[in-house]
Image (tube, rainbow, N blue to C red):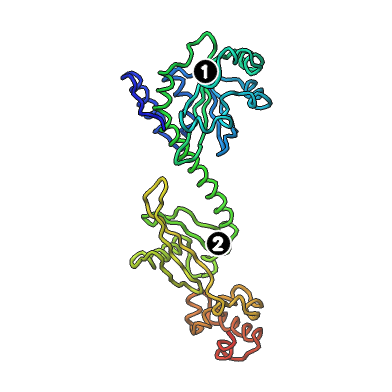
Amino acid sequence: MVSPVHLPKSDNERVMKLISGLSTSFKKGSHSLQHLLSEIFGYHSSILWRIDQEGSLSDPLNHYISDYLVEDYLNYFYERDYLHPKKLLHAYRKETVLRLEDVIPMKTYEASNYYTEFMKKHRYYYEMVLLLHSRDTLVGAIGIARSRSENRFTERDLNRIRAIAPFISNLLYLEKEYEKERKEKEVLEAFANKSNTGLLVLDDKLDVLYMNPAVWNIHRETALYKSIDSFIKDIIAMFSNQFTASSKLQLQGYNIQVIAHKEVFLSKESHYAVIIEKAKTEERLENDKIFDKLTEREKEICYYLKKGYTSKEISQKLFISVHTVNKHTRNIYRKAGVNSRALLQARL
């Protein structure tokens, strides 16, 4: 375990400046991280890596380091890197940050092909690597390099890095979780867009955050609402006055379930999912072979006939004449093989 870090006042001010710069946009804070390390601490040449739990590195983001160097490193020299996390996981968990001189005599390093064929070729000499972990999870690594003409990395550099490491680690952890949730959201939306079940997501003020295409289809099928807005408004009104954590309601042949959810990540606001499904099998007209034979208008009329509406009431609901209702009713009787409303209701 790393001991508490004591920094000079000037370094403490720099640490606070870095934290302030990162906190302005944590969701994409890693994009400004290396710029801030360069601007505030003078760590100009760096690579930010993603890392798995075995120490393998991927997705390099280089700052004042050439793509050619990164290509060389990935093609061959990562295996020769004395500070590669995969070789020193245990040491990094104890020390957080390591320099070349912490793991190998510099004379031995100078004679190695890692230096002569790679570092020297790209005009670097000193190297320091910070391993970042948060909540017992490795979240990233930062490699920092300097030329031989620059100052070597000192104990003061190590202490600076140890001081800022927890903040950077937390930043990358949150960014990783945010990205994971964003991708999961995209997958869920893709499935929801293909579903026949209506899905509404509302915020704590009951404003619509998301609505899948099935809600539009259900709105059109109910045939009672001139606009989607009035349809949604009625659904919200049904539960907003007597809402419970999991409410079940009904609307024109559909079951509506409302589920409350409080975000545990990034937000403390409540959200609500409104799930609109066809009624249970025994109530489901479209599962009946009779229903499959009907036109869309006949299905609408059949729904109200089943509920006991008169021809006049149906005409008012659907904004059509009584004569048209009776004409469709006769067609329904013929397709169902019955000659009265009572027999039709019995069949349904």
Residue situated furthest right in the rendering:
75
- Residue annotated with mark 2: 214
x, y (%) of residue 34? Answer: 49, 25
173 lies above or below 267: above
Q: Residue 343: name its quadrant.
A: bottom right
Secondary element under disc 1, as helix, strand or loop, is: helix
Q: Residue at x 46, y 72 (%)?
A: 251
Which label belongs to residue 191? none
Q: Could you tell me which residue is drawn at 41 percent across and 52 percent down? A: 263
Label 1: which residue?
Answer: 101
Residue 50 spot, x, y in % from top left: 55, 34
Labels 2, 1: front one: 1
* Residue toward you, 115 or 107: 107
Disc 2, disc 1: CB below 8 Å?
no
Q: The C terminus appears in which quarter of the rendering?
A: bottom right
Residue positioned 51% across, 83% down in the render: 311
Q: On the picture, is 10 further left or further right than 38?
A: left
Between 125 and 108, which is closer to the camera in this rendering?
108
Instruction: Give the residue type at disc 2.
Output: Ala
